Image: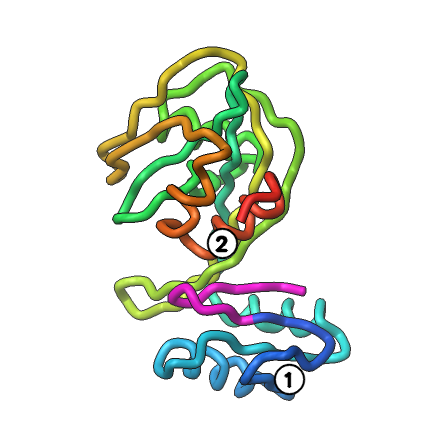
Amino acid sequence: MYKVFINEKKLSFTNTIQQIDKNLQFTDATTFEIAIDLLENTSTPEVNIYSEDVEATWKTFSSYFKNIEAAGGIVLNPKEEVLFIHRLGKWDLPKGKMEKGESRDITALREVEEECSITELAIKHFISSTYHMYNERNGEKVLKITHWFMMRHHGEQQPLPQEIEGITQAKWVLQSDIEGKIIPYTFQNIKLILKEGLGIG
């Protein structure tokens, strides 16, 4: 299954009809247009596109849009606290766009260091990838693919927000506080990663 968030609404790609209000059987590109229109211009909260070959349908879907890859992570310190940033009025995990020729894990490490001024970092393992769509200023639709890693900070550094990137806060948060203080004020794809990586949410 693939899940794409469009304006915080979910577009799923599966091989069966789901227990939601709107299921569309894939036929051609028109199916994608209908699904996106429903999510962008109506109150429909979720659409599922189903087909026998989910991978082929997803490959076709992603080929219609400009793809941008990014990477970031869930960073744990020795106290098992989690590193969060606050930007655009929401709590987020540190992440950023991949540079040309850069690997996913190197991007994740670099972005955490740049956005939070945290060093002594190490990758533990890959968690998964999330997808969301947005419109660029010229109207072009972008499919952003973010690759997430579980990471460790082997030190006692306090994070500093990269204000030039619009980050207003960067701080360690107790895992016991995430459910009440972070989950209600973050993005849907971050909720997915916190669930997959930490079992929270």
Query: Is residue 177 toward the left or the right of residue 63 in the image?
Result: left
Read off the magenta span.
1-11
Q: Nearer the viewer, residue 106 or 4?
A: 4
Measured from the top left, where is residue 30 in percent x and y?
Answer: 53, 87
| Residue of label 1 | 26
Query: Is residue 126 toward the left or the right of residue 80 in the image?
Result: right
Q: Nearer the viewer, residue 121 or 189?
A: 189
Measured from the top left, where is residue 155 in percent x and y?
Answer: 49, 11
Image quarter of residue 19: bottom right
Measured from the top left, where is residue 22 in percent x and y?
Answer: 55, 84
Measured from the top left, where is residue 179 in percent x and y?
Answer: 46, 44
Q: Which amino acid is tagged 2?
A: Asn
Query: Is residue 10 toward the left or the right of residue 2 in the image?
Result: left
Work out how far the residue at label 1 is from the one at label 2, CA to CA, in angstroms. 24 Å
| Residue of label 2 | 189
The N terminus sits in image quarter = bottom right
